[in-house]
Image (cartoon, rainbow, N blue to C red):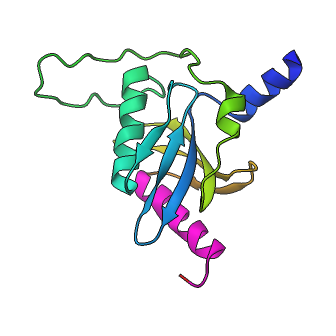
Amino acid sequence: MQEENKAEKRALPMNTLWLCIDFCGEDIRGRMYSRMSETLIRFENCSDMLLKADALFDERGYPQTFQEKRSFIRAERKAVYDSSPRERMMVAEILKQKGLCATFQIIVWSRSRAGWQGLLLRENGDTIAKFKSELELLEELQRELKARAPDR
């Protein structure tokens, strides 16, 4: 049983977003899950998804941002890089979640040059594409969603 738990954690690293898309049309809407978050993260569109995921990464300090963001809010707390953030949601719970349209994994390796770099995977772990920016990620997501529903 303990070996299964280790395998699950390797299959879903801390820097993974489990993306459940419940609506896909002109834009997407759905939920994200992360081992670093206690609860699901709802998003209303692509921009909302990126902003909320980035806020989670900033709050947890992982993956570390390459540049510090400027802020004019005095009381804002700066996150410190954490090489091993605390698990707040179990892998088994995350893997149960499915999107009505599609489910993907987004692994964010780094956040440098004011953008994300990482890997987009299907729910089963098959690689779709590597991305060097959020724009590339969104383009690959759109391409994959169109391929699944060619009549759109």
Q: Is residue 144 visible?
A: yes
- Name which residue lies at 51% across and 67% down: 142
- Name which residue lies at 10% across and 28% down: 72
Quarter of the image holding residue 5? Answer: top right
Q: Position of residue 4 (x, y in %)?
A: 86, 25
User: What count of labels does the image hold?
Assistant: 0
Report the predominant secondary structure element of the magenta stretch. helix
Of the pair 146 and 138, the residue shown nearer to us:
146
Position above or below: 142 against 132: below
Of the pair 83 and 44, the residue shown nearer to us:
44
Q: Is residue 113 visible?
A: no
Quarter of the image holding residue 16? Answer: top right
Instruction: Based on the picture, tell me whether residue 140 belongs to the magenta stretch.
Output: yes
Q: Is residue 46 left or right of residue 131?
A: left
Q: Residue furthest bottom?
A: 151
**Boundaries of the magenta span:** 134-151
Q: Position of residue 43 (x, y in %)?
A: 40, 48
Q: Is residue 119 left or right of residue 40?
A: right
- Name which residue lies at 34% across and 18% down: 79
- Name which residue lies at 37% across and 56% down: 45
Q: Position of residue 96 (x, y in %)?
A: 70, 40
Position above or below: 134 against 79: below
Position above or below: 93 against 142: above
Instruction: Based on the picture, tell me whether residue 116 belongs to the magenta stretch.
Output: no
Quarter of the image holding residue 66? Answer: top left
**Looking at the rendering, in which quadrant would you find the N terminus?**
top right
Q: Position of residue 146 (x, y in %)?
A: 57, 74
